[in-house]
Image (spheres, helix red, strand yellow):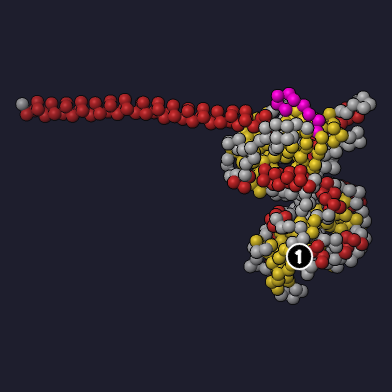
Amino acid sequence: MKRNLTSGARTGAGLTCFAFALVTMIGVRPLMAAEAASSLDIAQQLNEAFVQVAETVSPAVVVIEVAQKPATARFHRDNPLWELLPPEYRRQLEEEWEKESKEPAPRGEPRFNGSGSGLVIREDGYILTNTHVVEEAEKIKVRFKDGREFETASVWTDPQSDIAVVKIDAKGLAPAKLGDSARTRVGEFAIAIGAPFVLDYSVTFGHVSAKGRQQIIPSFGRDSLGAKMDQDFIQTDASINPGNSGGPLVNIRGEVIGINTLVRGLGTGIGFAVPINRAKDVAEQLITHGKVARAWLGIATGPLRESRLRTQVEDLKNGLVVDLIQTNGPAFKSDLKRFDIIKAVEGRPVANVQELRDAIRSKKIGSTILLDVARLDDHGGRKDLQIKIKTETWPEEEISLARRARSSDTEATPTLGLTVQTVTEELAKEFEVKKAEGVIVTEIQPNSPAALVGFKPGDIITQIGQKQVKTPRQFREAIEAAGSKEVTINFISDGVAESRTLKAKTD
């Protein structure tokens, strides 16, 4: 009896465990199914969000067709953005130009041989796009998704930001909702809408890969790298291709956070957009005043961390070294000197050219800016100073330089990372050097071979290998003749003859 009771107890316990397990299993399956259903719902909601963004924003996006002036290629090889185009697209453009040159358009009829995208920002016909889309255009047409077409009545461009505004005679347009790019976070969804390769209203999506990208566009001139162009890009892996330029980069809420501007190689997932806050500010000035007024100091600088002076001021981690002071600029009238280290503007630390430009641009024209500066003497001593400079408007001649890539007296060598010009009395005075036969270094690309071996703006190159150089063309030819071999460059730096050995080309 006892044995039976025990056996019964064991049997009862077993049934109890089985029942518990069965109930548990029955309960888990609905739970798993519920979780799966919930995940699917979330995916469907996200999918619907993308669809709604495309449907909401696309009516404010336009396709821009451009007829270039007869003597102007729509994207010339001297354009600063040319080198950033994918090789296959450059080749395609060259083939089209050759074809067009053999098949001229009938007299009086413009040939629409360029295209891009744009964005309606006001109901009365103002449209935002890129300068490089509409620059040098003879005629511009704007086409909406519903098929309506307009010819532009007015065009304003700002080469430094690559932002432009076109005006059409229309009322009651639906402008896009502009977001706040300052609040955009890395990792957010990003949606690009435009007309890549003339494929109208293509929608691609990805993420915001980075913010504050600088030194993306190379510059060729007397200033430091990129200093004549605004460079503060949003980087995205949303697919951007030629033709997307001028179109919007949008967040998941349908707010425009940037204007798509550049792509670095097709299929690389590296595209760049001008932040909408900057584009909006430029657009408002263009519409109101017809141009953008920027405060200007007339200096060129380089990061302290890449300067030979950094070993003399080890307590300073960031700052900008003044490489030159232009004689026609406001800084020339101040106590600022070449090789001064700018630590801060109005108490706001600066570590790169873009931060310096942003700090200056926020000031009104004619206002006085206070610079915190460290100055070194010949004996290794240091003074910390505060220097006042009264800002002036960026002169028109400097703006025109921003639009020009290479000129006959300028040569840029990307593989070495330096730009040279013919030595003139004016340049010698600006760089505070004694005029000599040769070519003067006007620009050094950070972390380039030339920068790493100690070249700096103001150095005068006199000889490459066994060849004397007196013009930028001779300089280029000597570098090309060196091929991939190492080449010895003789130059004068701070009045002292020196030489450096560099590899002219990377393999």
Q: Picture quarter containing residue 374?
A: bottom right
Residue sitting at x 92%, y 24%:
106
Choose between 306 and 366: the one closer to the eye: 366
Choose between 260 and 305: the one closer to the eye: 260
Asked whether residue 114 is in view, the answer is no
Q: Within the magenta stretch, is there residue 296? A: no
Choose between 392 and 207: the one closer to the eye: 392
What is the x, y in percent for residue 171?
73, 32
Residue sitting at x 75%, y 59%:
301
446 on left or right of 5: right
Q: Picture quarter containing residue 74?
A: top right
What is the x, y in percent for residue 320?
71, 61
Choose between 302 and 45: the one closer to the eye: 45
Q: Dot 1: few (<14), some (14–19), or many (≥20) neighbours within 10 Å?
A: many
Placement of the C terminus among the 4 image quadrants: top right
Q: Looking at the image, how many numbered discs can be counted on the residues?
A: 1
What is the x, y in percent for residue 377?
75, 73
Span of residues in magenta:
144-152
Asked whether residue 474 is in view, the answer is yes
Badge 1 is on which residue?
Answer: 389
Secondary structure under badge 1? Answer: strand
Q: Within the magenta stretch, is there residue 148? A: yes
Residue sitting at x 80%, y 33%:
152
The residue under label 1 is which amino acid type?
A: Ile
Indicate whether 50 appears above or below 407: above
What is the x, y in percent for residue 242?
74, 34
